[in-house]
């Protein structure tokens, strides 16, 4: 019951929060793990493993944070939401990290950009000063106010053809503000003064423009190398509730099958790196967990006759799965590695293909042996919407043959449906 | 009187990260990257060209369109005429895949 409440809590909270958060994993193994993370959020359903996962990671400037929840049902996906059918397997993890975006442009572009910025600043300042000068010069003249205003507007507008052309525009200027020859003479004198002012002011701008033109003759790259890196720490707990079979030496049902709740913990440091359409991730972790997944499972049916009824025979029947074997906790170090390359199949549509590996070094050999998991996964990404829509994986859970010498039996094939409820990838 | 108000429309795939966007060396931070119009109230002085510095990261499709509207400094900066596009608006120069072209730097002519 506690497990069910925990799971429902995770699911409901996750569903509510998923609108406002943004991050999830790109790749995904059979247990729903990946060392590659990217902003976005989603609910993933691993149909093969009957596992549901909600990933919620937010970002604020260069900081990233997140929560990842997984619930697993051993009885089939259809009964995930049925009463008491989601066990065993639920995990909660929290993540915090930092994002680095590095752009490597060539020096020419940077110099041009800096000079253009200086030029833009100088132009912006010049614009204001030019209008002030035009007004000042005309206001000092003896022109009729109506003519003066018309002339100010006409001369102010002469910069529309570009600052380098402004002296010529002023020289070519023929006023239409008045037909009076005396007033035209006054206007021409004012304009000459303005031309002198403009020429002086433009000298520094022209020097900058000239240098920009020289630099522009150098080839510039249309593509700057860029990398996005997430460094993160992730920790969490894994809870398992199951019936443990004490063995047939116990003659009483309640003594033989014990409801067992194990809570394991883990902590890991990871890096997720993206360049062009490649994603690579590593994380190194330590875990203290139970060997529940190594126990032997068996399905049972238990019937109990209700003797309070004397008209016929009333029997209660309970179907359940119990696990047997040597049970306990052990510590392990693990290294996870993931890679995905996105192949473009249409504009903004990608198929991600890549391998992953999970190396587990057990610090307590009595319960579990070391093992190496290796797999390859395929994921479909709608880049325009930033949504992963699902994927496949093929995995050997023990490629080194430590616990399963038969390679074929160690293979798992899975199908994952992803419901991305907010855009992935956006980092700010 | 090329004091202008600036309007731009930027549309990015979710996989594209807008690393830097500047008009006339002033940084802009669009709130909507799906293509809705954004109308900053900043007043810029430009003459025949507009300086754009945009740098993108990651990959995916991007598109940028820019318009300017003249403001009259002699009349309390009231708008004059309509929105004027850049000459290169809607050309291949202003749209691409960030995996091929991920920057747009230069002075772009205004279609007055």
Image (cartoon, coloured by chain):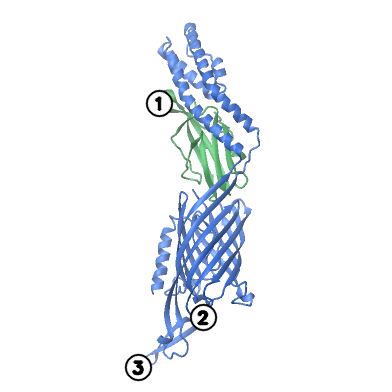
Chain colours: A blue, B green
- The image position of residue B40, as x and y in percent, is 45, 37
Query: In the current view of this chain or complex, which residue is farthest to the left?
Result: A308
| Label 1 close to label 2 by CB (< 8 Å) | no
* Mark 1 vs mark 3, CA separation in Å: 99 Å
Judged from the image, the secondary structure of the residue bearing numbered disc 2 is strand
Q: Is residue B91 above or below residue A100?
A: above
Judged from the image, the secondary structure of the residue bearing numbered disc 3 is loop
Mark 3 Cα shell of 10 Å, populated few (<14), some (14-19), many (≥20) = few
Please identify, in this view, whether the residue under mark 1 or under mark 2 is nearer the observer.
2
* Mark 2 vs mark 3, CA separation in Å: 37 Å
Mark 2 Cα shell of 10 Å, populated few (<14), some (14-19), many (≥20) = some
Name the residue carrying label 1: B76
Residue A310 numbered tag: 3
Q: In the rendered picture of this protein, how many numbered marks are placed on residues?
A: 3
Chain label for disc 3: A
Do we see residue A72 in this rendering? no
- Of residues A61 and A135, the one drawn nearer to the viewer in this rendering: A61
Name the residue carrying label 2: A297
Please identify, in this view, whether the residue under mark 1 or under mark 3 is nearer the observer.
1
Query: In the current view of this chain or complex, which residue is farthest to the front?
Result: A363
Q: Earlier in the sequence, mark 2 or mark 3?
A: 2
């Amino acid at each position: 019951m506690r497990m069910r409440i925990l799971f429902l809590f995770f699911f409901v909270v996750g569903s509510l929060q998923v609108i406002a958060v943004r991050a999830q994993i790109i790749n995904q193994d059979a247990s729903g793990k990946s060392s590659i993370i990217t902003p976005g959020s989603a609910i993933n359903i691993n149909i093969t493993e009957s596992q549901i996962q909600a990933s919620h990671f937010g970002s604020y400037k260069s900081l990233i944070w997140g929560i990842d929840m997984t619930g697993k049902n051993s009885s089939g996906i259809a009964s995930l939401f049925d009463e008491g059918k989601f066990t065993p397997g639920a995990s909660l993890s929290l993540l915090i990290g930092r994002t680095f975006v590095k752009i490597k442009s060539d020096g020419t572009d940077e110099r041009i950009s800096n000079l253009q910025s200086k030029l833009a600043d100088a132009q912006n300042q010049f614009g204001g000063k030019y209008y002030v000068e035009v007004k000042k010069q005309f206001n000092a003249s003896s022109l009729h106010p109506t003519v003066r205003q018309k002339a100010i507007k006409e001369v102010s507008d002469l910069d529309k053809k570009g600052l380098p052309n402004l002296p010529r525009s002023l020289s070519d200027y023929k006023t239409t503000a008045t037909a009076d020859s005396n007033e035209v003479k006054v206007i021409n004198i004012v304009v000459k003064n303005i031309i002198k002012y403009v020429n002086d002011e433009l000298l520094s701008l022209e020097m900058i423009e000239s240098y920009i033109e020289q630099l522009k003759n150098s080839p510039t790259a249309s593509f700057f190398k860029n990398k996005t890196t997430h460094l993160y720490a992730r920790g969490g707990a894994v809870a398992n509730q199951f019936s443990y079979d004490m063995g047939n030496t116990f003659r009483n049902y309640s003594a033989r099958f014990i409801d067992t709740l194990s809570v394991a913990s883990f902590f890991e440091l990871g890096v997720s790196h993206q360049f062009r359409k490649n994603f690579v991730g590593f994380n190194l972790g330590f875990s203290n967990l139970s060997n529940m997944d190594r126990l032997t499972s068996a399905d049972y049916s238990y019937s109990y006759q209700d003797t309070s009824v004397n008209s016929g025979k009333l029997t209660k029947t309970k179907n359940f799965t119990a696990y047997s074997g040597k049970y306990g906790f052990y510590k392990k170090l693990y290294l996870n590695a993931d890679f995905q390359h996105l192949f473009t199949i249409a504009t903004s549509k990608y198929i991600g293909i890549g391998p992953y590996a999970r190396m587990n070094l057990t610090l307590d050999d009595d319960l579990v042996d070391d093992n190496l998991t290796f797999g390859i996964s395929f994921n479909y990404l709608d880049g325009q919407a930033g949504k992963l829509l699902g994927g496949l994986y093929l995995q050997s859970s023990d490629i080194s043959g430590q616990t399963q010498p038969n390679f074929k039996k160690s293979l798992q094939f899975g199908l994952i449906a992803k419901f991305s409820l907010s855009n992935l990838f956006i980092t700010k | 009187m090329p004091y202008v108000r600036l309007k731009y429309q930027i549309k990015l795939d979710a996989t594209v990260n807008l690393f830097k966007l500047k008009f006339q060396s002033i940084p802009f931070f669009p709130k909507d990257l799906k293509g809705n119009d954004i109308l900053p109230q900043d007043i810029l002085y430009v003459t025949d060209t507009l300086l754009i510095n945009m740098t993108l990261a990651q990959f995916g499709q991007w598109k940028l369109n820019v318009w300017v509207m003249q403001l009259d400094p002699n009349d309390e900066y009231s708008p004059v005429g309509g929105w004027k596009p850049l000459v290169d608006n809607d050309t291949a120069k202003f749209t691409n895949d960030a995996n091929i072209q991920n920057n747009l730097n230069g002075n772009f002519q205004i279609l007055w």
